[in-house]
Amino acid sequence: MGVEIRETKVSDAEFEAMQEFVFEYLAASVEKEDEGGRMRWYPWHSAEYRHNHILNVVDLAEEIARSEGADVDVTRVAALFHDVAKLETDQELHAEAGARVAREYLESRGEYPESFVEQVCRAIENHSYQGDLEDLTLEAQCLVEADLLDKVGANGTALILLRMGYEARSHMDADEMVDRVMERGIDAANRVRSDTAESIAHQRLKRVRWFREWLEDEIAVMGE
């Protein structure tokens, strides 16, 4: 007798409910902070920014998973919950905390197989892994790659330039800030392992190089 394979399908309605839960959880995390909060004057520590980052990672992770043959449901659900505890927990603890939140949600709000829940939670726990991505499950690898890629390209450039204002920098420092995005992108390209993620990384790096060239053309001191 062969082994029965049970496909786990997360419906659009179920996934939408998960998205609403994640945003509400992030918003509640901010509301529970003491006045001033944990670096709340930086927009990327807001519930809105963190939720947007999560949705970006969901899209990227799903694209990579579909192309690389990973379990798309495991990957996209893990991506959705990967930073759910980011605003209430220290950086080094947020992956494990996020996995606990995901487990509680999945076990209490649906009849998902235990194997599915375990795969999702394992991917979330490992999404901050700093070693060789080939050591991870394919689903966790897709999540890590997506998380890396969201910080480079046009999105990464816009965020780093926004940061200039909060650091009281002028546009004359734009080359240094864009170089940070380039360095991050090169690091991401060197870390990813799938062909799909590598292609996305190089495409996004190309956009950053174009932007830097435009800056050099229009800001005199950058060409010196």
Image: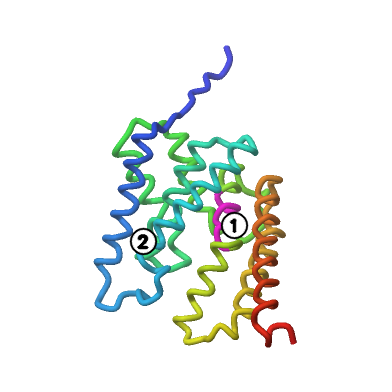
Farthest residue to the front: give it: 218
> Which residue is drawn at the image coordinates 42% and 57% (left, top)?
52
SS for dot 2: helix
> Which residue is drawn at the image coordinates 34% and 51% (left, top)?
22
Task: Please give the count of numbered marks on the rendered protein.
Answer: 2
Q: Amino acid at mark 2?
A: Glu
Q: Is residue 210 left or right of residue 126?
A: right
Q: Which residue is mark 1?
A: 149
Q: Which residues are magenta?
A: 143-151
Q: Amino acid at mark 1?
A: Leu
Q: Is residue 10 left or right of residue 171?
A: left
| Image quadrant assignment for residue 152 | bottom right
Q: Is residue 200 left or right of residue 27?
A: right
Provide the major secondary structure of the magenta segment.
Answer: helix
SS for dot 1: helix
Q: Is residue 42 above or below residue 79?
A: below
Q: From the top left corner, tell me how far across and down residue 128 is, in percent.
A: 54, 59
Query: Split into 4 quadrants, where in the image is the C terminus?
Result: bottom right
Q: Identify the mark at residue 48; answer none if there is no mark.
A: 2
